[in-house]
Image (spheres, rainbow, N blue to C red):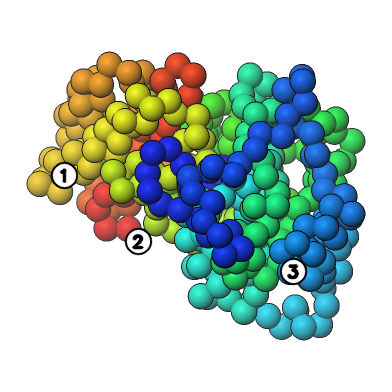
Amino acid sequence: MFGVVVGEGRRRCRCAGRDVGRMGSVRLLCTTNGLPKGAAMTHEERQRMCSELGVAEEKVFLSIKELREWRTSRAMAESSVGFVPTMGALHQGHISLLGSSTAENQTTVASIFVNPAQFAPHEDFGKYPRNARDDLANLFENNADYVFLPTQDDMYPGSKFGQTSKAVTKTHVVPDGIDFISEGAARPGFFTGVATVVCKLLNIVQPTNAYFGQKDGLQVIVIRRMVRDLNIPTRIVPCETIREDDGLAMSSRNIYLSKEQRKVAPRLYETLKLVKSAYEQGERDYARLIDLGNRNLEMEPLFQTEYLSICNSLEGEECRAVIPEENVMVSAAVNFGDCRILDNVLMGKQT
């Protein structure tokens, strides 16, 4: 979620003046049962990390109460606030979102929260890469003004650490119909978890603008619809997908790719560009475009295609029959058996 370092590419993030490379410093903070320990940063850890990084402690919020006290102050009520929600394991895609926010707002807040509600029980919540110190360094080095690191207990009162999906809360934001299309069908319940946590974060931070990577195309659609339908006074700003030199979309999960998988992964983006090229040359038949994309994906023996979709880029509905001239997104996900990658490109005029 949230956005977009990793794999074999050469893009790097800067952390407090030092080059951390392609996730080289990321540690998986796990206990013997596979669940991450240190789920909550203590006040003592905050003090130590902020001292090491040369950052004032009041720049790091550990609770909703701390952030709300800051947000409701007179000065903040008069400021434009940009918000970049992340799950940590930062890469250049996240830094690009941060740059967009700092360019457009007086104040920028970033959050780090690995959201259990969007992980199914069989997924990688326990091994998702976590390194709060490097992420904090990276955010402040790249001009974040404040960082919010909430605990699971604060975000989902009464939940138990290790619970995932719908088990973490009795109240959910459910995007109607989304579990039946593309990424929603591939990960049922995922977008309920995403919509729920983003709604909560927007309610807590109350930003003027919030920034999300276009790499997670259906996520952007879901969040924009939610903000519109629930009358949330925040402008959602989709930002361009940041890619490795060979075209692979940056993702925190690219660290899971083996050397062989990483080598062939860019074929996914090449396939989407192939479909877009046919569209730009005048092809509008849905079935022919889908067939073109699927045949190209099938040429890579390591790929197990989960879906190839051509949908409305504003609402998410599959186009079918004749593809329109505007607001189109072609997206796909492929599985390697032990990990998966997804990507999308926009087609036609975007309104």
Q: What residue does disc 1 label?
A: 277
User: Which residue lies at the image location 59% right of the left edge and 44% below the top edge?
Assistant: 25
User: Which residue lies at the image location 79% right of the left edge and 64% below the top edge?
Assistant: 51
Q: Nearer the viewer, residue 348 or 131?
A: 131
| Vertical comparison of 269 with 336: above or below | below
* Residue 306 badge: none
For numbered disc 3, what is the local secondary structure?
loop
Between discs 3 and 1, the one toward the N terminus: 3
For numbered disc 1, what is the local secondary structure?
helix
User: Which residue lies at the image location 39% right of the left edge and 39% below the top edge?
Assistant: 8
Asked which quadrant contains residue 333, the reply is: top left
Q: Which callout, 3 or 1, points to the residue nearer the camera? A: 3
What amino acid type should be assigned to the residue bearing mark 1? Ser
Instruction: Tell me if mark 2 has few (under 14), some (14-19) or many (20+) residues whose alpha carbon lies within 10 angstroms of its own.
Output: few
Circles 1, 2 touching at the beta carbon (< 8 Å) = no
CA gap between label 3 and label 1 equals: 48 Å
